[in-house]
Amino acid sequence: MHQRSHCPACAAPATAPVLSIPYDQPDLQAFLRRVGFGLPAEWFTGIPFAVHRCLQCEALFQGWVLEEPQLARLYGQNDAAHRLPSESALLALAHLAHDVLLLRRLQPMPQPRVLDYGMGWARFALLAQAFGCEVTGVEVSATTRAHAQRHGIQVCDESELGVAAFDFVLVDQVLEHLSDPAPTLTRLARSLKPGGLLLAGVPGHPKLAGHFARAARDSTQLRELTDRDWDALCPTIHVNLFDATSLRALGERAGLRGFRPPFWRAAGTGLLWDQPRQWGRNFRLAWKYSRGIGTRMWFQRPA
Ligand SMILES: [Zn+2]
């Protein structure tokens, strides 16, 4: 493992960690056992779980991250279940379809060229294809790459991404995993045509900094941390936790500028309006999109 000296979002120098505990701390180990964390214990010998908070953009990030060969072992095989649990499957797909519809309304050419970076089981990619887009995906797992190719999605490596090739790029639930997300996002920005749009989605947890600070002052509070708290900065996996400020800072470093989809266009492409909880979700997301806030944010490559 190696130590990061700068904020992954805005590149400000890292200051002392807000929380630093050994990996064998019992509450941390109990969480790792609950989620079936399967990485070799010897990787963590003598390494602390150290969380830093950037003084400039307020990103939270783990100080110690895995080396490339360790990452290849961690992400090389995607054995996660292909099927979503049935009760959440329809909603999850509707939320992806919402973004596909919105991208089609915002980029009204007959066949937008779309890149799904870190596409997993290609759910977004296949929906975008069904809605008339020409879709390329980047994915490290051989299993999921083969699945996407069988369904007509073009698959390429990050090094093969062209310049000014795409009208839209999705990078969803990816940036929180990357030790150094700026070069990747810069490459994605370059792969956009001038005026092209990028949607970046990351997990959010605005209260985590306070919870960790409390645990740093009083170690008995480590017991009070929930699985959601630990998972937001899951050791070596979710190594960055962004908020709107830090996500915007990262986008601007990559050469992008914030883009705000109009509220009614974002709300009008929402789905499942017969379900009361979707009213709140569709309006809330449209509001956040149109204000450029939250941790699911649109960017544009300047023309
Ligand atoms: Zn920062």
Image: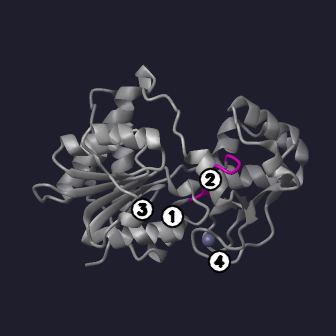
> Upstream in the sequence, badge 1 or badge 2?
2
Residue at the (88%, 55%) spot, across then down: 46
Q: Which residue matches tag 1?
A: 247
Q: Nearer the viewer, mark 4 or mark 2?
A: 2
Asked if residue 63 shows in the view, the reply is no
Q: Quadrant of ligand 1?
A: bottom right
Mark 2 residue type: Leu
Q: Nearer the viewer, mark 1 or mark 3?
A: 3
Distance between the alpha carbons at the discs numbered 2 and 3? 16 Å
| 140 or 223: nearer the viewer | 140
Q: Which residue matches tag 3?
A: 158
The residue positioned farthest toward the left in the image shown = 110
Q: Which residue matches tag 4?
A: 12
Q: Which residue matches tag 2?
A: 71
| 204 or 177: nearer the viewer | 177
Indicate the colouring scheme.
one colour
User: Is 266 on the left or on the right of 214, as rendered?
Assistant: left
* Residue 167 versus residue 122 in the image, above or below: below
Distance between the alpha carbons at the discs numbered 1 and 2? 23 Å
Q: Nearer the viewer, mark 1 or mark 2?
A: 2
Q: Which mark is residue 55?
A: none
Residues in magenta, as a range: 234-242
> Upstream in the sequence, badge 3 or badge 4?
4
User: What is the count of numbered marks?
Assistant: 4
**Magenta segment, prevailing SS (helix, strand or loop):** loop
Asked if residue 212 shows in the view, the reply is yes
Distance between the alpha carbons at the discs numbered 1 and 3? 21 Å
Mark 4 residue type: Ala
